[in-house]
Image (cartoon, helix red, strand yellow):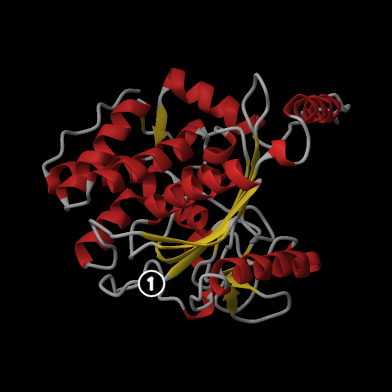
Amino acid sequence: MSDSRYVSCRVDADDLSRFIRQALGAVGADEASRQAVARALVTASLMGTDSHGLRLLPHYLNALEGGRIAPSPRLAFTRRLAGTGVLDAGNALGHLAGYRAIDHAVEMAAEVGLGAVAVANSSHFGAAGCYALAAAERGMIGMAFCNSDPFVLLHGSRAPFHGTNPIAFAAPVEGADPYLLDMATSAVPWNRVQQYAAIDRTLPPDVAAGADGAMTREAADVTALLPLGGESFGFKGAGLGGVVEILSSTLANMVHGFHLLPMGGEDLATPRGVGHFFLVMNPDAFSDRASFQRRLASYLADLRGQAAVEGKAVLAPGDREWRCRDERRRMGIPLDVAQRDAYRGVAAGYSVESLRERQ
């Protein structure tokens, strides 16, 4: 959840969705693209994934205006085998590509038990958890992967090689919110570093390095991230980053992340060719639904029932996100000063009705 020291104002989720859709419409994005981006950014912001939520809208607007992203893309899906297919996203916003790919994967999983979709010619898709969650909301187990341009050191390397290459996993839980894991394979997401730099907030130790390769906690000085596991055990994160890279780029016949144009670079006209991979599994293909839910509920009860150390709580993946969502539905989604000013600038620059800010 957000640190109150950095909150400038709060906005309601419905108003944020309205604003995002109107701003995207102002630069020519079609209805499907507007709906997908709003769904993903609001979902991420409600769950507390602030690094991949509303703060990304100005970038997407710039990329649409620059020509990197197609405002009305023509997505083409080819089903190659009973449970596999490839989606050519046509340089769409990655959110539209992600939700469309999940739709195809869910349809195949309902039919044959599994659905796997590789996505080519896409762009940044925000928080990977949004797409795994979309499968869980339809009673399926979902996984999402994506590569990106290089931000992360290999274990022992001097220069970045992998992207933050996220992994997301979600499973449906009867009568409750889904189990949801959404993690970068770096020690910290790059967008969080940018977020911290914008508000002059100090990073935790052992997650990032400066130009000289030395560890730094000053977000503005960061030029590379450490892989998950930090200096001592970063080979684990680097290996996971490689798994994500292979799934995301090679299966979709895209260049691997080391050769991608930077997301935040000066060239906003050339499509980047980002790759994604989605896997959806139908629990009914392995066990009857009642048994699956009973075993999952038993596991989660045992997990949450473990004794915690003083001052801590034992949480299952997703628990923090759902608590944050419930709080933000009541109190509003927080904006820091940089986000507030950026949204005011978007409203003025694109003649969009301003967000209704509240304290």
Please tell me whether mark 1 sits on a helix, a strand or a loop.
loop
* Residue positioned 32% across, 49% down in the render: 57
Residue 88 position (above or below residue 353): below
Q: Residue at x 79, y 29 (%)?
A: 300
Q: Position of residue 173 (x, y in %)?
A: 68, 27
Depth check: give the residue in front, 145 or 326.
Answer: 145
Q: Position of residue 140 (x, y in %)?
A: 62, 38
Q: Residue at x 73, y 69 (%)?
A: 239
Picture quadrant of residue 78: bottom left
Rendered position, 97 above or below 252: above
Q: Position of residue 42 (x, y in %)?
A: 40, 36
Q: Is residue 285 above or below residue 305?
A: below
Disc 1 target residue: 272
The correct choice, above or below, for 87 with respect to 196 in the image is below
- Return the x and y of residue 318 as percentages of the image width and height: 64, 34
Say left or right for 302 vs 43. right
Residue 353 occupies which quadrant of the picture? top left
